Amino acid sequence: MKGEEDASITFCKDVPNLLSFFVDTFVDFSVSGIFLPPQPSLSPPPPPLPTRLPSPRRLIAIGDLHGDLKKSKEALRLAGLIDPADRYTGGSATVVQVGDVLDRGGDELKILYFLEKLKRDAAKSGGRIITMNGNHEIMNVEGDFRFVTKAGVEEFRVWGEWFRIGNKMKTLCHGLDKPKDPMEGVPESFPGVRKKYLDGFRARVAALRPNGPISSRFLSQNVTVLVVGDSIFVHGGLLPVHVSYGLEKINEEVREWINGSKGRFSPSHCRGRNGVVWVRSFSHEVEQKCDCSALEHVLATVPGVKRMVMGHTIQTVGINGVCEDKAIRIDVGMSKGCGDGLPEVLEINGTSGLRILTSKTFNVVKEQGLGMLLAEHGGPRQVEVQA
């Protein structure tokens, strides 16, 4: 009898936590349409953000997504990472998405949730999906919403309503601490914001500000700089001053800021035209206007690195490289709200080198002064894939 009583007491003590998990899962599903159970509170804490990883057998790099869930899934299917039912099929592959999930589209939250689900599924298969901070993640955490769409405001308004409903449900259980109101400290009005958008605007501020429910849950898991094997990934670009400052230090400071311990504004290495998420020194369509000497210096000071892979600047010709293919530019403007280009992804394979996976039909054209990454001059091969 005593054992049954102990079990009953333990169960009753667990009821509040079980209710909290149920409510959080219910809210997530209502917002995203994805069943994403919260991680148990007894789970080990997340590991430190990776800054350097060994070379995997298969490495996939995906450019800017900008709030377009449909195109995001097309890119993932191009790489064989999901099937037609959106189930993870990437096996042990390592995937790097170089940032700019936010802005210019209306599926920002849905993409964040979908990528989180894929991260969990990939881990079960021995794979790894790594997401990075782009300039638009940094801007939104700072409260800079210049590139937010009406649909993006509406998506966060819906999130805010469901989040508050979830909080009200939790207050019905006396064993739970009173949940924090996400709108606490958010101004009641903002200059220039019309009344019909105010609820969504306020919800977006609440969700994405430092230590906000969405920024701390999703964006704090992003890296800002990443070395995988012989490739270094960054949203905008790395300059010698960034390497001297310390790649690990950059990642740690951005994560601390997103988690609310560094004030409103991002660390200095994320701001201005020379910030790691803003640099365009290696992104100009004309190779002669790219700073190949600075690139060479960076690569020479990061042991074992042969190339830099970056997004941020739309490449209308598709994924391509300059500076003897040591700068690989993978933002193809795939989002409907930002170019509406056909998705392409970069594959880095230990046995076959670099390949561009694309759904385009194309003619091989050599353009003066532009590294097209075509097999004719030693770069990655373009491979047409049926999406």
Image: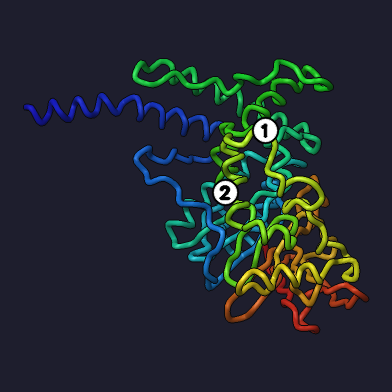
Quarter in which the C terminus is drawn: bottom right
Q: What residue is pinned by disc 1?
A: 264
Image coordinates for residue 61, horizontal then vertical, percent: 65, 62
What's the amino acid at mark 2? Glu
Q: Residue at x 64, y 78 (%)?
A: 353
Q: Residue at x 41, y 28 (%)?
A: 20
Task: Tell me, yes or no, if residue 215 can be seen here.
Answer: yes
Please identify the quarter of the rendering in which residue 187 is found. top right
Q: Which structural element holds mark 2?
A: helix
For label 2, count other residues whose C-alpha is less than 10 Å away and answer few (under 14), some (14-19) or many (20+): some
Left or right of 366? Residue 264 is: left
Q: Eyeballing the image, is 333 above or below 208?
A: below
What's the amino acid at mark 1? Arg
Give the number of the disc on residue 117.
none
Q: Residue at x 54, y 47 (%)?
A: 116
Mark 1 vs 2: CB contact within 8 A: no
Give 33 or 171, whichever is nearer the viewer.
171
Q: Earlier in the sequence, mark 1 or mark 2?
A: 2
For label 1, count other residues whose C-alpha is less than 10 Å away and answer few (under 14), some (14-19) or many (20+): some
Q: Residue at x 43, y 16 (%)?
A: 171
Left or right of 337? Residue 159 is: left
Marks 1/2: CA–CA distance: 16 Å
Give the number of the disc on residue 252.
2
Q: Eyeballing the image, is 314 above or below 110?
A: below
